């Protein structure tokens, strides 16, 4: 962890990453409900919303669409990821080097670690290389810290999430992206374990506005610093509306009721 | 993806790759019907046809035959490939470095990715290295995106092909070569998922002129940008004739009937 | 082994490493008894005690907290380590390069070797690279020498501990951190086998003050040069108190009774 | 493939490699019949015969014996090879780098590829590195192309040998060394599949003068460019005699009867 | 193989390596009989005997003890080795780089190869890298050539030892250290197969003076160039006495009776 409060990844010390790597991770099925969501342009547009600190995409999407948005969007290059055609133990390919991420304009990088997977050690070593290289460019590093794999039955239990956020601190991530542990207390534990590393919630699958915002509010109240959200934004008819609400909850400390007011 | 419309791989934004790596991938049996097709010279001659934007071959064929055709043929160096003597899960060897491809005159490179194979992650990382190196030389990158392997029963279902073309976009290919999903609707999905990455059809095994051209026409109507064709050209007695027809369908928007007129 | 008596890792030729990598190795559960022990600041404060020669932490903790303590604490960067979510044969990821450890201010490095594990050979080769690189920076190298894995039923038998300390000497560690073999005689064997390499005891899980100090005293009487202690310090309400006692036993040769006097 | 007719590996476009790596591949048993054949000097002497274009040996033999023969013998450094103590799937170690082969005077290099082996892909990638490095020194590359391994019951069937020679062309070998497919027709297929890559026969185990020469004659008649021979030369009492005969068949187009005349 | 008769590894073309890596390979149990033998100093003292051409130790021992003996002892750095806690197929870790061996004063290097092991190919490639690097520093290379592993029931049969010494020649070792094949005839075969590579006997476990010296005498009579001995020297009460006798047998051609005279 290094100080990142003056980096584009944060706004007033808070973080709202708009994530759009689902075409790789989940495939076309995630775009079924809102067919136009398959077009990256729509999510790049959403990412120009002032609530969004950075947009997280894979290399190919960044190459093709970021040049048109480099003035209005900050790029978080997600360095690894895998299709769900993959049937093995949780693992993921490094699809972009830090050097190339920097070259195409990324102002931060993201990396998944599946603690507990048979590939944990290999992934931790890939993380080491990426993290140390990112330091040379002063690029903040966000760890998608997702314990997963053989022997892990419940990957959203509080103690697993707390371990996940601690891994991010110990291994040198600046931001830990973890799943919501189900309660504000669980999130407090996760935040406490992360020390100076900022903890943000993974948005997960689409929920109702209120359900979703209430979990975000709980995260902020627990000391979390924001969230990384994908489907709960771009699987909505009107991404801007939910971003307006998120802006109120995350940066202005508004209640969910206030945030939901039109 | 980067802009490639001013590269030799395209003509008016369309692509017609003549592929001739079957001696490696399938072995001598592919040359049985037309014995003289075993001689690369015949296919290099065919590649001088103005309809062909590039000829895709392995390194050894390029070294031996391309020097005599460097004025008349554009070289797409296929970087990986494997014999069908190989009995394991779908995988493929990197047979040529990007540096060497560039040195011997390639103006684009090709790379196979078997999504869903037990080797998907390894291949994706090899692709990363090749793609980033190709960027240094401004060489367009064509991905042979073929989901295949354990757990994939039907690799030409529409949703699999759509995923295949999305992988090409997400991972940074400029052109996605995918199998024909069986319908124009399926191809539209594949094109839509590929975003700015151009989608071209894999020619597949030899069919009648009409059947073959109708699938090409469907690809073009679906927004595809052309095809990569091997056996449907050089397994014909008269490669020039089918290339004439393809030229009409791909670049002039002709109907199949028109294209078949002599 | 190289002479290290003029390095910050030693005081009068003795060593007291305060270890705090349990958040990675064991996870949040180690912090349950003393919740505030999850905050690295508390242990960095403890490490300012003059009895402590170095504080051993993983890279992330060092990045985040060491800058505030660089005048008062000496940093031993633990280069490898793994979560206990890992279910495979004993193995561990290299989480920090020697170059980066040096860059962020480490004055020594630590490395775990699981002799007898299916990964012994891989770990020994990783150790080689780290040790030779550490030599270029004149950084002392501490080996956490823990025989473990298939075929090793009892990893604290005297002959196993003696082998562990010999491995440290043969492979080029300056300090061997081994488990207590259960008796002063066993420790003498371990010290004898280590030759010029200093042997220190691994503190292990929390015990009573007297039990713990008596094992430390036995180590010193057996020719050991100190210990690396974690839980027996920061899992106590008052870390300073036990460090005062350790200072007397290790550096002043005091008896346990004397050390326990307030 | 690159033009090699002006390299020491050829004489009038033909090739006669004397191979002597059997001490590695087969062990001492190959030297039983002619005990003095264990001494490399004897085969270096034989290699001074004008019929021999190059002598193929492993690195150690080259280091020890080639310096005394560098004026009279051309060195083909065999880069990989394995003892027959190895019990696994067909595989082979890279025992010499191309850089070192060049440094000690090799004027060409050799490399085994076991197509169809579980290690085919790994070997093909090792071949790539060696071949591309050899190009930097303008060293011709000979591929020992031997399909072998699980799933390959008969590695001398004509279609397997034809595939073997095609692999050499596709992957960039200048010369394909293949086993005799049992007939002149089979050899013609192999030659046709290899395109511009020269095909030479692997000499195999010792046979009668007539049998052996007739297979060589068939190879030449089929368009082959020569052979690589070991045991059929140095397991004979008089290596020079058979080399005289080979010279007639290979370079002078003599019949077997003529060649056998004293 | 390169000429090494003017290197410190030889005296009058003969070799007597004192080996002391047993603390790594066998562990503390080898030091039980003579407890003071655990102290490397005792063996370094023995290595000052004029009969000893070099002392073979692992990196850590060299770092710690060689600086005090650099004027009186020649250092053979054993580059690989493994503890006997390892339960897998015969394999061994590379514990020291050639660069570092050279830096700390080695005048030759040693490397184990387990021909026939499942790791033979990997070890052969590690040997290649070490051997070629050693050539850059003109460091002689000794191969501990020990066929071992699945499928090898009897690793001291004559034909196995003969193969072992041939491997050393073929792969480029300057000296082959092999086990005694049980007879002078067997040793002659081994010597003959090694060509210009010098063959020395591995001393093995401790025997009586006469038994041991008779095997050494047989080795010399068979054309061997000496031995590498460990336990038969430093497991004796008086290492100097047996070294006196070895000096007579190896360098002066004395009979065993003469050598045993006081």
Image (spheres, coloured by chain):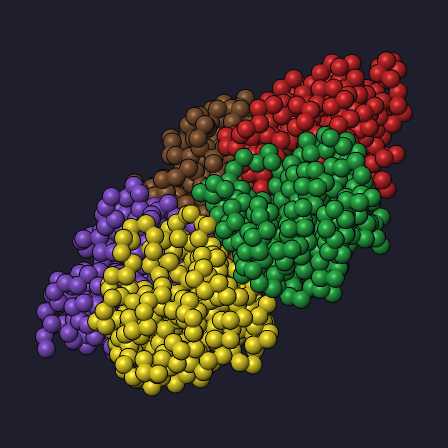
Chain colours: A yellow, B green, C purple, D red, E brown
Q: Is residue A5 left or right of residue C162?
A: right
Residue D212 position in % (x across, y down): 75, 18
Relative image position of residue B64 (x, y in whole percent) = 79, 44
Residue under the image location 47 percent in, 35 percent down: E117
Quarter of the image where the N terminus of chain D is located: top right
Compared to residue A170, the image places residue B89 above or below, namely above
Residue C112 visible, this angle: no
Foreground residue, E42 or C42?
C42
Q: Position of residue E101 (x, y in %)?
A: 52, 55
Q: How many marks are shown on the rendered structure?
A: 0
Is B154 placed left or right of C15 in the picture?
Answer: right
Residue at 72%, 30% (x, y): give it.
Answer: B32
Compared to residue D248, the image places residue C244 above or below, namely: below
User: Does residue B159 lie above or below C262 as drawn?
Assistant: above
Q: Could you say which is closer to the camera, residue C224 or residue A203? A: A203
Instruction: Please determine whether, in this image, residue B14 is positioned above or below residue A183.
Output: above
Residue at (66%, 28%) from the top-left corner?
D160
Residue E103 appears at what percent x and percent y? 54, 59
Q: Can residue B86 be seen in this view?
A: yes
Quadrant in the rendering for residue D52: top right
- Closer-to-camera residue (B219/C17): B219
**With C11 as the anchor, is B15 left or right in this view?**
right
């Amino acid at each position: 962890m290094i100080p990142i409060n003056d980096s584009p990844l944060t706004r007033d010390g808070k973080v709202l990453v708009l994530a759009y790597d689902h075409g790789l991770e989940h495939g076309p099925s995630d775009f079924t409900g809102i067919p136009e969501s398959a077009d990256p342009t729509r999510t790049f547009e959403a990412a120009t919303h002032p609530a969004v600190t950075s947009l997280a995409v894979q290399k190919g999407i960044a190459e093709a669409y970021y040049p048109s948005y480099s003035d209005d969007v900050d790029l978080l290059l997600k360095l690894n990821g895998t299709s769900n055609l993959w049937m093995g133990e949780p693992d993921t390919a490094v699809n972009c080097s830090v050097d190339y991420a920097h070259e195409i304009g990324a102002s931060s990088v993201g990396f998944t670690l599946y603690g507990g997977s048979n590939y944990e050690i290999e992934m931790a070593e890939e993380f080491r290389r990426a993290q140390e290289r990112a330091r040379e460019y002063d690029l903040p590093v966000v760890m998608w810290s997702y314990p997963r794999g053989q022997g892990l039955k419940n990957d959203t239990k509080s103690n697993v999430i707390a371990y996940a956020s601690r891994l991010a601190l110990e291994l040198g991530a600046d931001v830990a992206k973890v799943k919501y542990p189900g309660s504000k207390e669980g999130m407090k534990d996760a935040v406490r374990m992360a020390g100076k590393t900022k903890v943000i919630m993974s948005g997960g699958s689409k929920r109702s506005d209120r359900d979703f915002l209430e979990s975000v509010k709980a995260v902020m109240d627990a000391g979390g610093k924001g969230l990384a959200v994908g489907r709960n934004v771009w699987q909505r008819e009107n991404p801007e509306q939910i971003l307006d609400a998120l802006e109120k909850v995350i940066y202005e400390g508004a209640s969910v009721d206030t945030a939901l007011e039109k």
